[in-house]
């Protein structure tokens, strides 16, 4: 045991949290872009300090902001992204085939957003129900013909569904598990809402990819938990659910899609995919606290390297602007302390952000055409996952000697 202070209790197993995964300092909520009037007011900052539990190895933030505060009027509509729709459509076809879903089956999706996924089941004549906490987003789903209930999912909602005879043959949750404050209530609800021989599929970013890819900027207050397959198995087991299959997906920097069933359902044996990925996680040390302690040093080294690049450029009289103002860019900007002393401005294609300022760092956001007007020497690519696309799109900046900087996985200038 260590003599570290106890910072709280593990969200899953209630063990004392004593081990820092990474401490990114104080940050405002990453989606709270400010208007010109708001930058003259006080701004709320919360600790962005991730811990790892030394019993179940769940990486987690403490909950400072309630989900109802974050999600009751959520601005993110899934259907805005073409690639995400294609992902949803392919998934639908595969699930219908693999699980022989028919007009007699029932699909439930938790955090169903604007019906981006369930619309494809509805189109194939399979009854579907969405559960979505944000009323404005749920209304968009209903307009698409996807029946949607406005609720947070947990044991209470699941009991209501079961009482109505509406348990699911396929129960879906994509990119929701990280945002659940009470894991036992949520996963316990999944067990209650699932038919005896039903299947749960869930997608979430994979902690192993986050660590290997140095993706520390994907840590933000809205995401309370960061899962390995090891910790996910432990969490599902607590509700008598077994993860019997898993796939690795390229989405969100590297995600997992897990398949779970009731423990008593022996019709679906545990696949080699599960055994192989658990073995891989153990091989890199995700079942020992020492491995987690190395992440912090890696992140701090990246901060020093990025700041060195930016400071040297400024010292040489160069101008730097940020390309893109994604939510995760704000974790990076706040943690590194990058403000208008280093970045003149940011550009983004989303008109909502034009005329606003990045939270905490107060960098003004403009439409992309400002780059051609001001001809900066460097573009710092904040949505680094789209780096190839952005470099291709903005290649013409090389005409005036412009160059690109990517912060992650390794802060560097693209040659
Ligand atoms: Zn734990």
Image: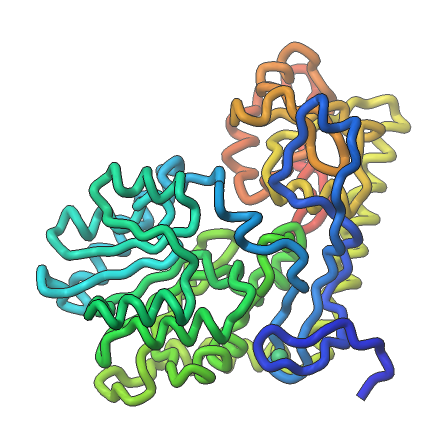
Taking the spot 59% from the left edge, 81% from the top edge, the residue there is: 13
Taking the spot 46% from the left edge, 40% from the top edge, the residue there is: 76
Quick check: 55 left or right of 110? right
The type of colouring in the image is: rainbow
Q: Nearer the viewer, residue 354 or 310?
A: 354
Above or below, 75 against 184 in this view is: above
Quarter of the image where the C terminus is located: top right
Q: How many callouts does the rendering have?
A: 0
Where residue 250 sits: x, y (%)?
Answer: 44, 55
Quick check: 206 left or right of 411? left
Where residue 378 sits: x, y (%)?
Answer: 72, 27
Above or below, 271 against 203 in this view is: below
**Can residue 111 be seen at all in this image of the molecule?**
yes
Where residue 215 sits: x, y (%)?
Answer: 63, 54
The image quadrant that residue 396 belongs to is top right
Task: Indicate which quadrant contains ligand 1.
Answer: bottom right
**Can residue 379 be seen at all in this image of the molecule?**
no
Taking the spot 64% from the left edge, 52% from the top edge, the residue there is: 220
Where residue 40 sits: x, y (%)?
Answer: 79, 27
Above or below, 301 against 382 in this view is: below
Quarter of the image where the N terminus is located: bottom right
Quick check: 372 left or right of 176? right
Residue, far right = 315
Q: Nearer the viewer, residue 231 or 378?
A: 231
The image quadrant that residue 136 belongs to is top left
Residue, far top = 373
């Amino acid at each position: 045991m260590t003599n570290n202070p106890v910072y709280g209790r593990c969200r899953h197993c209630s063990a004392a949290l004593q081990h820092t995964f990474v401490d990114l300092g104080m940050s405002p909520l990453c989606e709270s872009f400010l208007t010109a009037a708001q930058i003259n007011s006080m701004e709320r900052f919360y600790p962005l300090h991730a811990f790892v539990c030394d019993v179940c190895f769940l990486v987690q933030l403490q909950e400072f902001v309630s989900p109802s505060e974050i999600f009751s009027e959520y601005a993110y509509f899934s259907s805005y992204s073409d690639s995400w729709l294609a992902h949803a459509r392919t998934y639908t076809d595969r699930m219908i085939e693999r699980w022989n879903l028919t007009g007699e089956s029932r699909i439930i999706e938790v955090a169903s957003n604007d019906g981006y996924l369930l619309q494809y089941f509805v189109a194939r004549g399979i009854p579907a129900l969405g559960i979505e906490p944000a009323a404005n987003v749920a209304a968009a789903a209903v307009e698409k013909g996807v029946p949607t209930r406005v609720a947070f999912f947990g044991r209470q909602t699941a009991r209501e569904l079961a009482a109505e005879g509406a348990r699911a043959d396929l129960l879906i949750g994509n990119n929701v598990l990280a945002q659940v404050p009470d894991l036992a209530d949520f996963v316990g609800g999944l067990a209650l809402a699932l038919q005896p021989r039903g299947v749960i599929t869930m997608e979430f970013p994979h902690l192993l990819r986050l660590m290997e890819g140095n993706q520390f900027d994907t840590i933000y207050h809205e995401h309370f938990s960061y899962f390995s397959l090891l910790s996910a198995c432990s969490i599902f087991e607590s509700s008598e659910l077994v993860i019997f299959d898993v796939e690795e997906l390229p989405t969100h920097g590297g995600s997992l899609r897990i398949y779970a069933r009731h423990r008593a359902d022996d019709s679906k044996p545990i696949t080699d995919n599960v055994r192989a990925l658990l073995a891989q996680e153990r091989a890199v040390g995700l079942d020992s606290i020492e491995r987690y302690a190395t992440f912090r040093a890696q992140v701090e080294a990246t901060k020093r390297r990025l700041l060195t690049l930016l400071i040297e450029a400024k010292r040489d009289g160069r101008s730097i602007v940020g390309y893109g103002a994604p939510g995760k860019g704000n974790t990076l900007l706040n943690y590194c302390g990058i403000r208008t002393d280093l970045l003149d401005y940011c550009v983004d294609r989303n008109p909502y952000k034009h005329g606003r300022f990045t939270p905490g760092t107060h960098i003004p956001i403009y439409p992309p055409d400002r780059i051609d007007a001001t001809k900066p020497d460097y573009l710092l690519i904040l949505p680094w996952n789209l780096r190839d696309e952005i470099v291709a799109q903005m290649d013409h900046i090389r005409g005036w000697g412009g160059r690109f900087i990517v912060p992650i996985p390794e802060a560097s200038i693209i040659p």
